[in-house]
Image: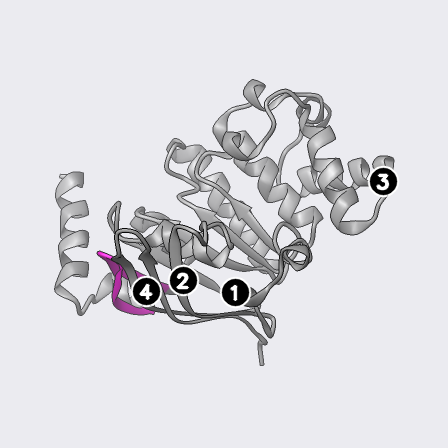
Amino acid sequence: MSKKLLQVEQLSIALKNPHQQLIRDINISLEEASAAILLGQSGSGKTMTCRAILGLLNRNTFQVDGNIQFDGVSLLQLKEKERTLYYGSKIAFVPQNPMTSLDPSRKIGVQMAGFLKLHQDLKGKDALSLYEQALSRAGLTDTKRILGSRPYQLSGGMLQRCLIALAIAGKAKLVIADEPTTALDAIHRDKAVEQFLHLQEQGCALLIVTHDFDVARHIGGHVLIMKEGRMVEQGRAKEVLQNPQAAYTRELIEAIHLGWR
């Protein structure tokens, strides 16, 4: 029986001043090596939900209520010094625009090796070697060039795969990805999906934010449909996408079908 890894219960988020309820009563459950997909239109609250789980919301601006348990630990109760034990190591993040999370002036190899040194207590040479191996496992062949490149010298799709490789090297238990395929063409989108599935095969759980129903179908797992900060439908991906019960879900699927005509 798989171990419960992430448990989000009654997550609600409000803007403090002026008060405005943004997210209400979101529940997510993830076991090891499982996947959950947050689907919905822009502005539905998918990204904000993930940012709350990642501890990225400014507590002076937002009120976050509910319970977020990761591997038996309450993430909302973590002190600042404790956060590095989880975020960036056990919980990895792949943002929509990877350039925003990387230093454009430093080489990829230097940045990633520095991260692994911090979280795995490795020497620089060993950390760099570990990351290069992870690049290969992520399906990237020109590893020397990648290690010696600065972020602006690589495409968005390549940078995303570099961050996926970092999750592989860091042995993350959970990867949260925010719209990871939005800026990619069909070929690179399929490669990115393959890498996420590879992570899952290694025992990593996935929480993916997307509005791409094809990505949701390929990754599978549990789908949660969001609208205006609320969850309107959830269930197994195949069942929800083939036989949606909520009117909003049916409208989303129909809109996609119309776009294909």
Q: In this rendering, is residue 56 above or below 225? A: above
> Does 180 sit left or right of 20 as displayed?
right
Which structural element holds mark 1?
A: helix
Q: Which of marks 4 and 3 is nearer the N terminus?
A: 3
Task: Give the CA separation, mark 3 to mark 1.
Answer: 34 Å
Residue at x 30% of width, y 68% of height: 234
Looking at marks 4 and 1 on the same chain, the residue that comes earlier in the sequence is marked by: 1
Q: Are marks 4 and 1 in contact (CB under 8 Å)?
A: no
Give coordinates of residue 109: x percent, y percent.
Answer: 72, 30
Span of residues in magenta: 223-235
The location of residue 59, given as percent across then percent down, is 45, 54
Q: Which-is-in-front pick, marks 3 and 1?
A: 1
Q: In which quarter of the image is residue 91?
A: bottom right
- Which mark's residue is nearer the viewer, 2 or 3? 2
Horizontal side of 147 relative to 186 (left or right) equals right
Marker disc for residue 76 = 1
Q: Mark 4 points at which residue?
A: 238
Q: Label 2: which residue?
A: 64
Mark 1 is on which residue type?
Leu
Q: Do the residues labelled 1 and 2 touch (CB within 8 Å)?
A: yes
Looking at numbered disc 2 in the image, what kind of residue is underneath it?
Val
Q: How far apart are marks 4 and 1 (CA)?
A: 32 Å
